[in-house]
Amino acid sequence: MIKINLLPHREEKRKQLKSDFYGLLLLSAIVGALIVVVVSAYFSRELGTQTDKNTFIKNEIVKLDERIKEIATLRQEIDGLKARQQAVEDLQGDRNQPVYLLDELVKLTPEGVYLRTLKQEGQRVVLTGYAQSQDRVAEFIRNLGTKSDWMYKPDLDGISSAVLGAAKDAKKVSDFQVNVSIRRPREKEDIASQAGETAKKPGAP
């Protein structure tokens, strides 16, 4: 027997497809919402963790800045103490400078040169005197610049002709003024130490 289905099967199929579509659409919306919630929660947790880390780092930076300020203050105090200590040592060393200076001048003043005055201004000494000739003055300046461990950088401040004595005993001389720097004992020791290190280097003469 032949059976004929007279129901509107196409309409039913269309309704079924529509119902399935809406169901899938609802399921997709639910899954999407769940994904958004999970991702949002994950990023919120990561953001909170990072915020805590940033806060911790900022607090540590503040602590480090305070320590750096303390260290800077300590360094300033140490530098001040070193400067005062160096000043005391220089004062103690400077006591013997006149002795060293006079001893050097005796050795370095050539014949024909007569020192008249000696005036010290800090680490600079002003020498005035008479010389038989300008060549004697030049020799004196060379001695001060090359043969002295205590004096350096001699500078001829002025030279002029002068006459000593009267009548038959009158002599024509050169009246000169020389400025020269003097070293402190510690500066002399530093130069000697540097010279020793240079001599130890390979290839040094």
Image (cartoon, rainbow, N blue to C red):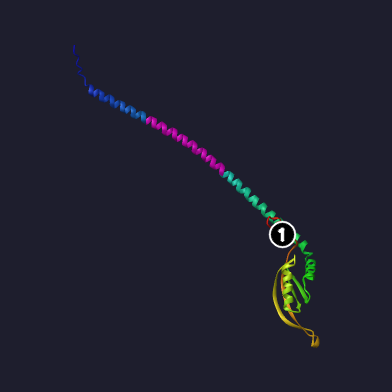
Residue at point 62%, 48% (across, down)? 66
Q: Position of residue 67 (x, y in %)?
A: 63, 48
Residue 134 sits inside the magenta stretch: no
- What quarter of the picture does the N terminus occupy? top left
Task: Give the main secondary structure, helix, strand or loop, of the magenta stretch.
Answer: helix
Q: Position of residue 172 (x, y in %)?
A: 75, 83
Residue at point 73%, 75% (across, down)? 137
First to last magenta residue range: 29-57
Residue at point 31%, 28% (across, down)? 21
Q: Secondary structure at mark 1?
A: helix
Quarter residue 191 falls in: bottom right
Report the residue marked by disc 1: 195
Residue at point 80%, 87% (across, down)? 168
Point out the residue furthest to the bottom here. Answer: 167
Asked if residue 122 shows in the view, the reply is no
- What quarter of the picture does the C terminus occupy? bottom right
Residue 176 or 192: which is nearer the viewer? 192
Residue 5 or 199: which is nearer the viewer? 199
Residue 31 sits inside the magenta stretch: yes
The three-letter amino acid code for the residue at tag 1 is Ala
Residue 176 in the image: above or below residue 77: below
Within 10 Å of disc 1 (Cα), the crowding (few <14, some 14-19, many 20+) is: few
Point out the residue furthest to the top here. Answer: 1
Q: Position of residue 65 (x, y in %)?
A: 60, 48
